[in-house]
Amino acid sequence: MTAAAAHMGRLPQANRLASRLVCGGCGTVLAPADPYPFRCPHAGDGRDHVVRRVLEPGMLSFPTDSGDPNPFVAYRSLFHSHHLALAHGMSDDDYVSLVRALDGRVADVDGRGFRATPATEYPDLARRSGAGGGLVVKDETANVSGSHKARHLFGLLVHLEVVGALGLIPPGPLPDLAIASCGNAALAAAVVAKAGGRRLQVFVPTDADEGVVTALAAHGAEITVCARQSGTSGDPTYLALQEAIGRGALPFTCQGNENGLAIEGGETLGYELVATLLGSGKSLDHLVIQVGGGALASAVAQALEEAVGLEVLGHMPKIHTVQTEGAWPLKRAYDRVTRHLGQSRDKGAIKAAIGSAARDRGDYMWPWETTPHSIAHGILDDETYDWVAVVEAMLSSGGQPVVVSEEQLVEANRLGAEVTGIKVDETGSAGLAGLMALARAGVIGSDERCAVLFTGVRR
Ligand SMILES: [Zn+2]
């Protein structure tokens, strides 16, 4: 790493990197030397500002032959931190060593490091759920800390380690990391932060699961319980997180508007799905994804779009999203966008409608008015923070949002767990509930191939 540090003075230009970090709301390009390029500097003016990692397709190809079981090694050539590292003179070998060392420390904390998760065809489940042309289940329940969330956060940790190794971080004590969550995201953050030797502040609601809080404390996280204030709308843990960020903590969160770079780590799930499709020689017609804050859907859709852009995937599957009757702010936003769009699904018209929606965020996305409840409690976010990217992915791919009942969530979970033997919870199998609803509504054709993501283990 000392060789890399010697290159400190030669800061790369944004246009020389294979990726740029660009605000999806206002177009601001973040400076490549900024060690914490998580949030748009113009956030807070009523526009929807989310930093996105944008690849330069002409400078890249999709890694199809790495064979490395660790997705953060296999797909490193698509990561902004890799582009930054190489531009500063760090060697590819040093980058890989850094990732493997961090992964080893994750394994020390959690008993397992990052490996490509299984994606399995279940013909029986396909038949019984209405996906007549076949169904792939991508199983994240055995991933680090028991869900996909750790992917998002490990990508951030790699970035933090890289900018540290490159000498881009100002001298002085390292800032705390901070997250608002009561479930899988907090657990993942605690594991990954501990692996990185970083202090973590976690803001949890009053009804947080006792087992989760105990596990967070065991990993050394600093826990703050936040009560809902009468007369104030919005998630109190999220408001507390924003205050902590205001005091200098770094957002170590899966909420894209607080940390746009969190999307990138989650893309590894999509890249693995692409590899599965390429390996099977079969294409995919529909992908149904459960949505809380929207980072998962945003990440997976972006990964598939990149694979199409890099010409390894022939076309996008239709991206559908699932929320519960408890709270469906994403569908509410989608309905408002389509009201402006009318029947047109022309590329230019979608871009214009999305651009206009991002300019007037408050007309499309605001906190759900009532305290939401559902058995799928992991997708009850008051707001869909990554809504713009997800609405755009649905519109441009021809997908749609679906809202499912508690009965549908229970039925899908029972069926999915029984047929696959995967210990998935109702949040984790909510995509299957959505698929079954879409099949019953005739949206999914009897010969079409589908995929769902089983995201969280039953604890
Ligand atoms: Zn912006």
Image (cartoon, helix red, strand yellow):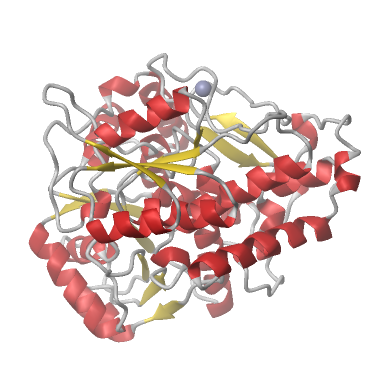
Residue farthest to the left, as pictured: 407
Q: Residue at x 64, y 43 (%)?
A: 160
Q: Residue at x 45, y 22 (%)?
A: 246
Residue farthest to the top, as pictured: 45
Above or below 144: residue 82? above
Above or below 180: residue 109? below
Q: Residue at x 57, y 34 (%)?
A: 175
Instruction: Report x, y in % for residue 233.
Output: 19, 26
Instruction: Report x, y in % for residue 451.
Output: 37, 68
Left or right? Give the position of 180 relative to 188. left
| The C terminus: image quadrant | bottom left
Q: Nearer the viewer, residue 224 or 288?
A: 224
Q: Nearer the viewer, residue 235 or 419?
A: 235
Left or right? Give the position of 229 relative to 29. left
Q: Nearer the viewer, residue 301 or 87?
A: 87
Instruction: Report x, y in % for residue 25.
Output: 48, 25
Q: Is residue 353 visible?
A: no
Left or right? Give the position of 29 relative to 230. right
Instruction: Report x, y in % for residue 327.
Output: 17, 43
